Image (spheres, rainbow, N blue to C red):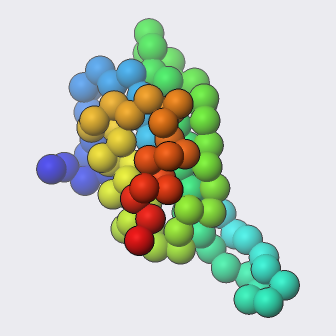
Amino acid sequence: MPDIQTIHHTNIPFHWQYQPVRKQFSHPDGGTYFSYGLQVYRCQNQLREPVAYIDDISVCQNFVEDLALRFTVHQLSPVHLHDAVIDALP
């Protein structure tokens, strides 16, 4: 299976594209940390429109990149994003 960077730079006409997003967060007990979320885009007529976002899924970049790749390849509907992320958590 291709990596996430390859899949986002192809001419394959995906309707949904998932992209990892890195953000900095702060917690009173743990201090500052970086975590990864997922941005979902609707791709139509050469346009990418953001339609959904979940932040702070995991501090593991590889885990969230794998989710983005799987969800893009299998064209997960954003309606199921929350449940799919919960189901994928270790």
Q: Is residue 28 above or below residue 79?
A: below
Q: Extreme top residue here? A: 45
| Spot occupied by residue 35 in the image (x, y as percentages of width and height) | 59, 69
Q: Is residue 61 above or below residue 15?
A: below
Q: Extreme left residue here? A: 1
| Spot occupied by residue 61 in the image (x, y as percentages of width and height) | 44, 68
Q: Residue at x 61, y 49 (%)?
A: 54
| Spot occupied by residue 70 in the image (x, y as percentages of width and height) | 30, 47
In this picture, residue 35 sits left or right of residue 19:
right
In this picture, residue 19 sits left or right of residue 1:
right
Q: Nearer the viewer, residue 88 or 67?
A: 88
Q: Is residue 23 visible?
A: yes
Q: Quadrant for residue 64, please give it.
A: bottom left
In this picture, residue 20 sits left or right of residue 7:
right
Q: Residue at x 28, y 35 (%)?
A: 74
Q: Nearer the viewer, residue 78 or 14?
A: 78
